[in-house]
Image (spheres, rainbow, N blue to C red):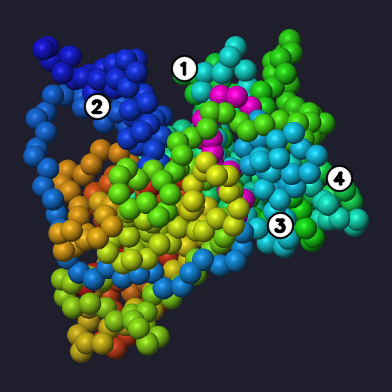
Amino acid sequence: MTKNSQKISPIISLIILILTGGASWLFNQLQPNQTNLFTLINSAFAQTPSTTVPKPNPQEIILPGEVRSLPGKLDNVPLFNSNSPEWVKQGGILLSTFPPNNKTTPAAHLNYRFNGKFNLFAHHFSHTPPNLQTLYIGIIVNNPTAQPVTVDILGAASYLMEPEAPFQQKPMMSENPQGEIYSGPGIRAVDNVLRGIRQDIFPAQIVIPPGASEMLMNLPIPVRGLARAVNGRSTFMRLHSSGPVYVASLAMFGASEATGDRPPTVQEWEQLLNTGTFAMPRDKIPTPLEQKTGQLIYGRVAGVQAGSNWVANLVDEGKDHLKIPAINQNISYAISTLPGGRLGTGQTQAGEMLSRYPDTAYLAHANYGVHYDLTLPLFNPTAETRTISLTLSTPQKEEKLSKGGLIFRQPSWDFPFFRGTVRLRYTDDQGEEITRYLHLWQRRGQIVEPLVKLQLNSQEKRNVRLDFIYPPDTVPPQVLTVKTIQ
């Protein structure tokens, strides 16, 4: 083998695997962890070495210490979660909460009304469509009442993978005060909404006449002109309705015209809603929750999720503070736990489904779009000043801690499992109130730098607040760790 062939072998191996029918194997292997093929391809290119260097033997690093369940629980704000099928080859109904009456495909309509606060997440891809047609994603809202209903759009963002937010390797941690660092369309969308942004492509509100429907979104996923005919769109919204409404997300290829693909009209979306069937192809069928053996397939989500926000004070039991650990000791809190990945806590944080399609996920297993808002009232009970660190990291996923602690590895596993922006608010050692936005890009098992280090005086209590909207294309679980350094 030549030096050059050694240099490009990871890419060649991946391409050969795909071209020889290995794509299905890749999807089967990656789907339970919600890592898509395009991410894998990007990662392979990102990880190709510029020179041939022998890989060191990986070493496991076990982080001992207590791993706690996360206090609190999901609230009651429902989340419209449209993520199946992720790859759309044939247009149709992605998710409809309309009533099934007078519909050609009654099973495609879940008959669920939103009223008051609710959130919306939609995440879909187009891959080599016929004639490179543009796929459109439409979100339609219906007022079933005899009075006008106002839908306020409190925060909203929608981005294409290309060219607006490509999956790209980033530094492990970057200061991101203006939101200019992102590593995927879903990551950029939830970052915008975390900052209270409503993109100007969305109005502040829509007023829906009695019995009528209005388009909340009608946006394209173009592939023409791209180096690879693959593209995706991620959308996240915080909404409030003054009365009950039905919502549906739909996929349709634009009608071809001399000047390019024409976006569907409201009438065409309504016709698809009333007479269409499910978008295709369907994703892998999930493993029933009661099944305890065999392969665990989570499936992708298409339904109404129970809960959009997890607000918690991370304190010791029966106390109003969190006592910092002893020197060189740590306390970790599990984030976004799910069956098969509860890290010994026994806690499932994945949102329950209020309504879902039978061939889609039983739980919102990655909690995409859930706002985690965590406050740590740190307390130093000792007679000495102590230095503590706060770290958000991604250990190996385990149901129980098989080796007595969290498993990391040096070097880490290849693929990025957490990509997104978190917001950190605290009082620094000089007494100044600090707000920082940090973009994190972490591989599974990677040893990462702390978000912050603080010096707490004897008997001092100081709050640190960390919040983020759980980023799409992130793979759970994560841990938030407090360690006393000295």
- The span shown in magenta is 79-91
Badge 2 crowding class, 10 Å Cα cut-off, few under 14, some 14 to 19, many 20 or more, is some
- Give the mark, 3 or 2, whose residue is nearer the N terminus: 2
SS of the residue under disc 1: loop
Residue located beneath label 3 in the image: 114
Q: Which circle's residue, 2 or 1, is located before the other in the chain?
A: 2
Residue that badge 1 annotates: 227
**Numbered mark located on residue 212 in the image:** 4
- Please state which amino acid type lies under the numbered disc 2: Thr
Mark 1 vs mark 3, foreground winner is 3
Residue drawn 71% across the image and 40% down it: 106
For the question of whether residue 220 can be seen, the reply is: no
Q: What residue type is disc 3 on?
A: Phe
Q: Report x, y in % for residue 311.
A: 49, 69
The label nearer to you, 3 versus 2, is 3
Horizontal placement of 38 versus 450: left or right? right
- Position of 383 with respect to 237 (left or right) is left
Query: What residue does disc 2 label?
Result: 48
Distance, label 2 to label 1, CA atoms, is 19 Å
Q: Is 424 rendered above or below residue 396?
A: below
- Could you say which is closer to the camera, residue 291 or residue 53? 291
Q: Secondary structure at mark 4?
A: loop
Helix, strand, or loop for circle 2? loop
Q: Are marks 1 and 3 in contact (CB under 8 Å)?
A: no
Tell me how far mark 3 sits from mark 2, CA to CA.
Answer: 47 Å
